[in-house]
Amino acid sequence: MNQNYQTRISPQICKVQTDRKLIAVYDQLKCAALTHYAQLHAKGEYKENDHKANSLIKITIQDYSNGTGDKNVIAQFNLAPEQIQFILTRITAGFQEFEWSQSKIYGAPDAQGYSTAQQFSISRHVCDSSGRPMKSPWRIQIVNGKGVKVQNQKGGSYMKSGSFLSEKNAFIQLTDMDLYTLLKRTDSYISNWEACIAPSLIANGKQAYEKQQQDWQSQNQGQDQGYAQNGQYQGQNPDYSQNSQYQDQTQNYAQNGQYQNQTPYYMQNNTQNNQYQNQGQGNTYAA
């Protein structure tokens, strides 16, 4: 049994174990589709097993303080790669006090109208509630349960306030070094995963993108040539010139004398009104 366990391939990146609890992180990273190659990480652009594919890091907390087997409580939560890296920066930046949380609800509702729900929270406090300095200032808690999913106007979903029902609850206290080790190794794995995936994904993506641009240019050139052959742009008189509604109207205007060698109306007024005629000659200006 132990030999099979030791030789079994595991996606576990790192784990930190205390006396009665354990926290571990697992690789659930997925590369982006070719259509979104520059993202590197999948963000729901395609589906796997009828579920949207997302690039994630799974975190599990085991609480076996009450025993193993059925008494062992295991809660899990999925974080995005950048969320792992964000929390790591809180340690490297030296934050003394910190709190962050997230909740999720997903899946089809059951017969009672409940969907799968998860909650994650992490905090750092220098002192406990009694004011005593804490040796393990970091606290991570994961709660798994169910809740009522509500659709918003933008097509997303959120959990109805007060509908969450807890089924599994586990937390762990960690030192600065414990959490730094956990997150730093995970961050290193994410960076190396990106370095491994990126060359072929980017090369294939850019090649497909360039081909797409060339195909679009060829289609546009073909359309322009088609327009030219049809006479839409090739030296063609406008349609209104062929329309009898406007044809030869200029000739009628010319015959009627409306514009033919006529003095404009405002010039006739100036010519007939001696009040303003040649007044400019009498004006003098200082040199």
Image (spheres, rainbow, N blue to C red):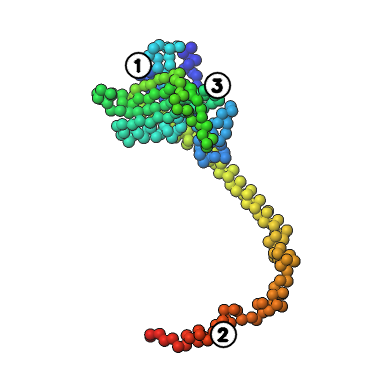
Q: Horizontally, is 38 left or right of 220 in the view?
A: left
Circles 3 and 2, Cβ within 8 Å, touching? The answer is: no
SS at badge 2: helix
Q: At 40% across and 85% down in the image, what residue appears?
A: 285
Q: Which residue is mark 2?
A: 272
Q: Residue 120's x, y, as percent?
A: 42, 26
Toward which corner of the image does residue 129 lie, by quadrant?
top left
User: Disc 1 to disc 2, how far (Cα)?
Assistant: 112 Å
Tag of residue 110: 3
Tag of residue 19: 1
Q: Amino acid at mark 2?
A: Gln
Above/below status of 224 relative to 115: below
Q: Amino acid at mark 1?
A: Asp
Q: Quadrant of the C terminus?
A: bottom left
Q: Residue furthest bottom?
A: 282
The answer to whether residue 102 is seen in the rendering is: yes
